[in-house]
Image (cartoon, rainbow, N blue to C red):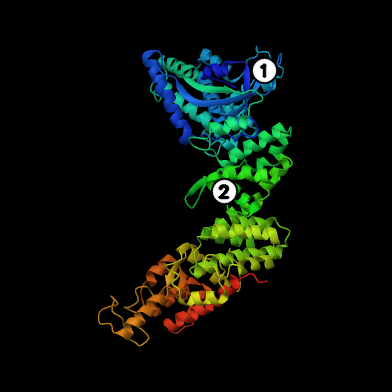
Amino acid sequence: MESKPLSLGKIVSERQRFVVPIYQRTYAWTAKDQLEALFDQIEDKTEERLATGKVQFSHYMGALLLIPESDPVFGRIQNFDVVDGQQRLTTFHLCFAALRSLARAYKFDAIATHLSDLIVHGDGVPMEEPRVERYKLQPTTYDRAIFKDIVDLSWLELIKKHPDHFHKNGRARASAPLPLLAYQFFWEKAESFITNDGKDKSSPDVEKRLRALSTVLFEDFRLIVITLAKDDDAQVIFQTLNSGGKPLAAMDLVRNDVFHRAARADEDEEALMETHWSAFETPFWKEVQTQGRITKPRIDFYLAHTLAAEQGKLISLGELYSEYKSFVEARAFANATDELKVLTRYIDVYMRLVNAQGDDALARLARRLQVFEVSTAYPAVLVIDASAANEEAKQALYDGIASYVVRRALCHLTPKNYNNIFVELAGHLKQHGVSEQSFAAFFAGKKDIDTGRLPTDADLKQAMRTLPQYKYIPQPRLKLILEELEFASRNSFNINGSLQDGLTIEHLCPQEWPEFWPLADGRSAPRDRVTGVDEDMRAAIIARDALVQTIGNLTLLTPPANTVASNYAFETKRERLQDSLLNMNAAILKTATWDDAAILARADELAALAVRIWPPVQT
């Protein structure tokens, strides 16, 4: 292994090519996160060079880890695989390309020629395959085509070839490929710098400033270039270099590890990428998500759920890559193909869980889990979906998971143990078979444990009669429960049915009820619920306050209707209930008065619907 600091100019001036291996992640630098800070550094060094004629201290940009593809061959340009540092190297090539295009636009031909020599080998350079070897950098597969076009085409030619990437005014869209956005960024920033924000476009200093800007990049920005011998373990060194600072996504490390091992085993990396890993190369997987206190790219959460589903054990998100290495070692895959088949087998169902679209049992479950924030159930869902069970059984199990979550919420049972419960369930189903019998047997074993038990029908009915749901269950979850009860009351179990937008939860008997809502004995309670209260009234007030927050006293109204109904008497609320056109409210309108007995009666009616729409899985 050889290590030495080199200027960027020295690195890119040589007769050699840098090849980003197929397993490397796509170009990911953005203006906000990396490019703005980088150009500020370039500007600072350029101002120093313009002021003093030199730069006192070079700026180091980290490491570039290379490994030669083969020994040098006569007549052929030598290739080096970029094991680490490809984001930096690609960024500098895009910057040089932008500066070259800017020099051409301002007719600074000598500068343009020098810059061109940094990104392509000229016609006078001996090459065995000029069509490929002329490019000094070959990005990873998904960036390669747009990168070549950036190098070869003018801005107008880029617009003509890729119209979908541009607005009508000729600027790149925010959705355009990141290399194109970086190229535009450097062009615009550099032009603003050399022209003093457009004030000095015709000044002779423009050429001087562009030359200084190019010189700074060429001479004053440096990388520590580490060139490995063929017998060095590139993956170990890669992990060491990336062990500090901002960590890579665990799946970045997994990808590198898988394809390094595939290369050593002479497996077809291109075929592995195209057939298997390419499914992960979309923006969907790169979106940052937060679960609990942990924030990661979505692909890392997918990896954690996959490992939990495969092993039926809890996975540490903080040690995700180590968890994967341990899994691979234990599973002892015959080849990378088998390994990638397992890694990608849950992609479709996971995307369905995230997108939560459709009318089937899985879509209903997905929406429920999202509202209740129970992604910890995903490993069990993955196991069920991947099984050979028929669709009817799968749907019953999906409904069973939803029932477990909703019933426990209504019964005020903690969700804190769900991460353990659902990975245990995943392991149980893998071991004993994916069936309703196996599912029911698992929860039968938890019936005496409050942190894991599935509430019975009797538990659910009692909870809906007596427990205060409004102040206990977060409103988005309580709203979903009321919506599903509304659909069930229509005899149409369809969570994706039509409801007016913006419905809110309304107390039929308001929380501030004393003014318009007399007690059962006809007396009105004082507003402060204390003044002049005897023991009988105090007991009645306590009972009323408890019932007000129960689900029997809750319904859905539009926000304006909710505001109008407010704390008024039941007769005033009738009009708003009628206007809502909800079936559950039509049933309430049949009640002559709304009192404690009516609340309890409605709780029993809703409980009868609840045991039907959130059923326990039966053996």
Residue 216 visible (yes or no)? yes
The percent coordinates of residue 47 (x first, y second) are 39, 20
The kind of secondary structure element at disc 2 is helix
84 w.r.t. 478: above or below: above
Report x, y in % for residue 445. Answer: 61, 68
Q: Mark 1: which secondary structure?
A: loop
Residue drawn at x 54%, y 58% as measured from the top left: 370
Tag 1: amino acid: Ile
Q: Position of residue 307 (x, y in %)?
A: 62, 49
Task: Locate residue 380: give its quadrant.
Answer: bottom right
Q: Quadrant of the N terminus?
A: top right
Residue at the left extreme of this rendering: 532
Above or below, 79 relative to 27? above
Task: Quickly name the residue at label 2.
Answer: 301
Q: CA distance from mark 2 to mark 1?
A: 42 Å
Figure check: 66 above or below 169: above
Residue type for callout 2: Phe
Foreground residue among 311 and 212: 311
Looking at this view, is 81 or 186 the one in front? 81
Mark 1 = which residue? 77
Q: Is residue 186 left or right of residue 527?
A: right
